[in-house]
Amino acid sequence: MQKFGTSQDLQVRIRAVLDTVDREFSSLTDEQLRWKPAPDKWSIVECLQHLNLAERFYIRNIQHKVDALGFIQTAPVDQSLESDWIGKAFLYVVDPQIKIKVPAPGTVRPRSASDLLPADVMTQFVDLQTLLHTLLDKAVYLDWNQEKVMSLFGNWLKIRVGDAIRMLVAHTERHMKQAMRVKVEMDTFVR
C-alpha cells in the first residue's frame, strides 16, 4: 500500500461519508436524530458526537504535524506504508467489518442524546471531516511511517501518522454503519 494512493482513497471515503450524512441524516428532525433503538444503544446524534470527540483529538494532532512543516516544501515523496503492532491493533479494533464491541473510553463517550444539539453536532462532524479531507493534501508531505501522534491513551502510546489517518476513516465508517442501522431500525419501528 502506497501513501499517495491511500491518501486519495481516504479522501474518496471521507467524501462518501459526507454524502451519506447529507443524504440520510440532514432531513431528519431532532427527535429522529435523538431516537435510540434501546436505552443502552446510541442514537444517530450520539454516534456522530462520539466521532467528533475522538476524531477532534487525532485531527488536531495531525494538524500540528502538518503545520510544523512550514511554507517551503519540496515535492512529497511516495512511500510504502508500514504498520507496527500498535497501528495494527488500532486498525483492527475500529475496522467496520469486525463485529467485536469495544467500549468507548470515557473521554470520547457522548453525553445523552437529550443533552446534545443535533444541528451543532452535525455541523461539527461535517467541519471535522472536511478538515481531515483537506489535511490529507498536506499530510502527504509527512513521513507516514516515522512521524507519530499521541493516542487517546496518552503520550506514552503513540501511533504512526499513516495508521492514525487510516484509523480515523475506518472508525468513521464503523460508526456511520451503526448510525445507518439506527436509522433503518427507526424507520421500521416508526411505521
Image (cartoon, rainbow, N blue to C red):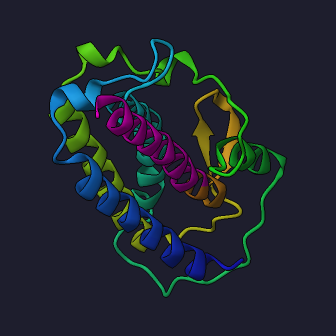
Q: Nearer the viewer, residue 118 or 127?
A: 118
Quarter of the N terminus within the rendering: bottom right
Q: Is residue 7 visible?
A: yes
Q: Nearer the viewer, residue 162 or 42?
A: 42
Locate residue 125: give its quadrant.
top left
Query: Is 96 drawn above or below residue 113 in the view shown?
Result: below
Magenta extent: 167-191
* 19 relative position to 132: left or right: left
Q: Position of residue 56 (x, y in %)?
A: 40, 39
Q: Position of residue 129 (x, y in %)?
A: 35, 54
* 85 relative position to 65: left or right: right
The answer to if 91 sits in the magenta stretch is no
Query: Is 1 drawn above or below residue 66 in the view shown?
Result: below
* 142 relative position to 97: left or right: left
Q: Nearer the viewer, residue 99 or 167?
A: 99
Query: Is 5 drawn above or below residue 189 in the view shown?
Result: below
Locate residue 35: give its quadrant.
top left
Q: Is residue 141 visible?
A: no
Quarter of the C terminus within the rendering: top left
Locate residue 154: give its quadrant.
top right
* 146 relative position to 107: left or right: right
The answer to if 176 sits in the magenta stretch is yes
Q: Main secondary structure of the magenta part?
A: helix
Q: Position of residue 30 (x, y in %)?
A: 17, 29
Query: Is 81 drawn above or below residue 161 in the view shown?
Result: below
Report the residue at 44% width, 60% height from top. 66
Residue that sits furthest to the front in the current view: 191
Q: Position of residue 90 (x, y in %)?
A: 70, 43
